[in-house]
Image (cartoon, rainbow, N blue to C red):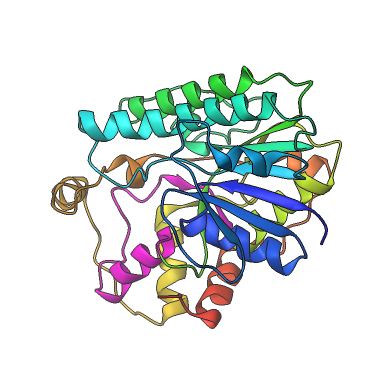
Amino acid sequence: MKGKIIIPGGSGFLGRSLAKWLHNEGYQVIILSRKSRSLDYAENVLWDGETLGDWAKELEGATAIVNLTGRWVNCRYHKRNRDQIMNSRIRSTRIISEALSQCKNPPSVWLNSSTATIYLHRYDKPNDEENGIIASHPDAKDVFSVQVAEAWEKEFEKVDPSLTRKIIMRTSFVYGVEHGGVYETIRKLVKLRFGGKMGDGKQYVSWIHSDDFCRCVQWFIENEKARGVYNICTPNPLPNKEIMRIIRKVMNVSTGFNLSHWMLEVGAFIIRTQTELIIKSRYVTPARLLAEGFSFAHPTFEEAIRDIESRGIIR
């Protein structure tokens, strides 16, 4: 075994993708989860994301922590959901920090999730790690999401850097084959012939193939010089209109009805989600990954979607 990787919140789409990848790469994987389950690619250890328990023993001597904990954001942002979204991220980061401080041999690196949504809704130029603007915008209806991202990163900044190497992952939309991902939802819309542009279709979509997300994580773990904030996305963001055109092309769906802003608002209310997830222009690029020599296996969107389609979505 190369080492032990702890993945708090590893039972979702992204966690399953990463756990399987790291298992296949020769790592021992421990998933911290609220539910008991039997897995053939990882050991499942119970935790509540808020209090210390036996799970904290797993951190001793581990190679890395990859914290993916956080309530799903694909919901309506009423008070209860807002509280759960915020608290699940802040409290889990805080309790991991407490457990880490008690380790005699703490993990070598801690990768903590964040989101590319932290950057300004814009069309003029991409946000990178050095020059990106962190702000909300009324057109994107993203005030709460930016507040969550800032609070999350601020909590992680409190972690003593002498304890472990620290990395913040500002992750874009991740496309992959595991059940529950964003692509699964989009391809359903395309099959129903609702795969045209959404809103004006000009909003940028930053994205990454799940394999490249996993490769980024492994690269961070194994590259001791990597630390600080990284944008986790390909160098090739595309407007929504182009994203949908490519997906229709790959899926051999000839038509796709456009969804205007008012249609998106009605649809979001019906399926209990927020239009921000669709209308915000996430124009983000991975300047640090490129400068430090990371190479993407799936840098172009059409090739990435063809690869995913060739494997089939896991149910």
Quadrant in the picture for residue 65:
top right
Query: Does residue 314 lie above or below 288 as drawn?
Result: below
Residue name at image x 76 percent, y 65 percent: 25
Q: Is residue 230 left or right of residue 63?
A: left
Foreground residue among 117 and 264: 117
Residue name at image x 39 percent, y 67 percent: 184
Residue 148 percent location from the top left of the image? 42, 27
Quadrant in the picture for residue 39:
bottom right
Residue 145 percent location from the top left of the image? 38, 31
Residue 170 in sight in this render: no
Query: Does residue 20 lie above or below 239 as drawn?
Result: below
Residue 204 in sight in this render: yes
Residue 8 percent location from the top left of the image? 55, 45
Residue name at image x 61 percent, y 60 percent: 19
Residue 189 percent location from the top left of the image? 29, 67
Foreground residue among 125 and 312: 312
Quadrant in the picture for residue 247:
bottom left
Residue name at image x 26 percent, y 42 percent: 274
The residue range painted magenta reads 180-209
* Quadrant assignment for the C terminus: bottom left
Give yes or no for residue 192 being in the magenta stretch: yes
Q: How many marks?
A: 0
Query: Does residue 313 lie above or below 37 as drawn?
Result: below
* Quadrant assignment for the N terminus: bottom right
Q: Is residue 180 left or right of residue 173?
A: left
Q: Is residue 198 left or right of residue 104?
A: left
Foreground residue among 202 and 160: 160
Give yes or no for residue 279 being in the magenta stretch: no
